[in-house]
Image (cartoon, rainbow, N blue to C red):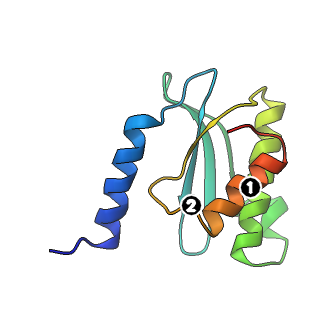
Amino acid sequence: MALSKIERRQRIKNRIKKVVSGTIQRPRLAVFRSNNEIYAQIIDDTKGITLVAASSRDKEINTTSGTKTEKSKLVGELIAKKAIAAGIETISFDRGGYLYHGRVKALAEGAREAGLKF
């Protein structure tokens, strides 16, 4: 029996979650991608708190024009700037069950270019 897209993504997400977890030294950059927007959070899983967050709905990015992929790269750059301001330089990347291409890849590349180390 074929799995639905949601079930398939959930299985991949669970498989990733076994390996990737955020500590205070190396927090987790979690990505959520909806049809129109993209959201990123840097999370410390030991305390269960979000340290930094950014999304395509933020004022700086929402007012710009461009494709969803271009906005994703801007979200990556924005979260990297916020993280560096908060004293976070190295992270572990959690793609959230999404394939590493398109908008997710653009977000990761934007974060790397702005100074985060994966």
Q: How many labels, in total?
A: 2
Q: Nearer the viewer, residue 57 or 3?
A: 3
Please give the name of the residue rendered at 60% of the width and 21% of the height, measured from the top-left corner: 24
Inspect this view and state whether residue 55 appears: no
**Amino acid carrying mark 1 in the image:** Glu
Residue 26 drawn above or below residue 35: above
**Residue 17 image position (x, y, % from top left):** 41, 41
**Residue 27 image position (x, y, % from top left):** 60, 31
Q: Which secondary structure lies at badge 1?
A: helix
Q: Quadrant of residue 53?
A: top right
**Residue 50 image position (x, y, % from top left):** 59, 35
Indicate which disc residue 109 carries.
1
Residue 78 drawn above or below residue 99: above
Q: CA distance from mark 2 to mark 1?
A: 11 Å
Please give the name of the residue rendered at 49% of the width and 29% of the height, measured from the top-left corner: 45
Residue 13 drawn above or below residue 27: below
Inspect this view and state whether residue 79 appears: yes
Extreme left residue here?
Answer: 1
Residue identified by numbered label 2: 100
**Which part of the image, by quadrant, shows the C terminus?**
top right
Disc 2 and disc 1 in contact, CB within 8 angstroms: no
**Which part of the image, by quadrant, shows the N terminus?**
bottom left
**Amino acid carrying mark 2 in the image:** Tyr
**Residue 116 image position (x, y, % from top left):** 76, 39
Question: Quick one: label 2, few (<14), some, or many (20+) residues within 10 Å?
Answer: few
Please give the name of the residue rendered at 48% of the width and 32% of the height, measured from the top-left corner: 21
Please give the name of the residue rendered at 64% of the width and 21% of the height, measured from the top-left corner: 25
Q: Which secondary structure lies at badge 2?
A: loop
